[in-house]
Image (spheres, grey):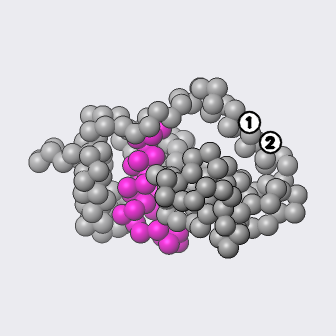
């Protein structure tokens, strides 16, 4: 089971954060078909949000065909998303090494997110957007003179540069997670 982390200062609607974190968990394999999502009551107790907000998020996930509500039993995962490499894959190890190298080069979290988003936009362009580099009129990440110039797309709730923290299970020994259950943080770039 997962726990949701709600960032009340992100400007992203609470139900959208739940949808994004659920999708991220599906992509990372933290949730698999057949797994039960926390009940609305469990989410409300853990996050102090309105139960209707949780139900709205679950309805959105159900509309997308990712989960199904079973009367009297709860909400269950119907299918997973993507084929994200496992924790021990060479791709993840390479990305981890790249992130460490970026940190050593003096880039902060926002710089790395902006650079990563720019590369994602180049490699995986939006089907509706014109080809070519991003428009210079778009908002940029904070400028770092030692970092490559970045022009990134606007920060939207689904933009990876909008993530305050990657979606990952929290450590069972973490003081912010005394229950020991996996907890999700951040959003989903879908």
Residue furthest toward the right? Answer: 146
Residue 152 location (% of width, % of height):
66, 62
Camera-side residue of 176 and 67:
67
Q: In the structure shown, which secondary structural element does the residue marked by tag 2 occupy?
A: helix
Asked if residue 77 lies left or right of residue 144, the reply is: left
Residue 123 is marked as none
Find out whether residue 18 is within the magenta segment: yes
Point out the image quarter for the N terminus: top left
Instruction: Tell me the residue that label 1 is attached to.
Output: 97
Could you tell me which residue is drawn at 43 percent across and 54 percent down? Answer: 20
Could you tell me which residue is drawn at 50 percent across and 42 percent down? Answer: 169
Secondary structure character of the magenta stretch overall: helix
One can see residue 162 in this view = yes
Mark 2 surroundings: few (<14), some (14-19) or many (≥20) residues within 10 A: few
One can see residue 179 in this view = no
Instruction: Tell me the residue that label 2 is attached to.
Output: 101
Cα–Cα span, label 1 and label 2: 6 Å
Residue 43 location (% of width, % of height):
33, 56
Mark 1 surroundings: few (<14), some (14-19) or many (≥20) residues within 10 A: few
The reply to whether callout 1 and callout 2 are in contact (CB within 8 Å) is yes
Could you tell me which residue is drawn at 62 percent across and 33 percent down? Answer: 92
What residue range appears in magenta? 4-28
């Amino acid at each position: 089971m997962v726990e949701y982390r709600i960032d009340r200062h992100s400007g992203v609607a609470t139900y959208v954060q739940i949808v994004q974190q659920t999708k991220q968990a599906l992509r990372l394999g933290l949730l698999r078909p057949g797994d039960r999502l926390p009940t609305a009551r469990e989410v409300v107790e853990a996050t102090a949000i309105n139960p209707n907000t949780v139900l709205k998020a679950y309805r959105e996930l159900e509309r997308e065909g990712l989960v199904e509500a079973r009367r009297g039993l709860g909400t269950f995962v119907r299918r997973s998303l993507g084929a994200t490499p496992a924790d021990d894959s060479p791709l993840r190890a390479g990305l981890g090494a790249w992130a460490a190298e970026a940190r050593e080069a003096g880039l902060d979290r926002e710089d790395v997110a902006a650079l990563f988003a720019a590369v994602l936009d180049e490699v995986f362009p939006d089907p509706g957007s014109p080809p070519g580099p991003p428009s210079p009129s778009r908002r940029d990440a904070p400028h770092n003179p030692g970092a490559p110039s970045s022009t990134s797309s606007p920060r939207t709730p689904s933009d990876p540069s909008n993530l305050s923290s990657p979606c990952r299970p929290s450590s069972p020994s973490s003081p912010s997670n005394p229950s020991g259950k996996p907890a999700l943080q951040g959003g989903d770039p879908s």
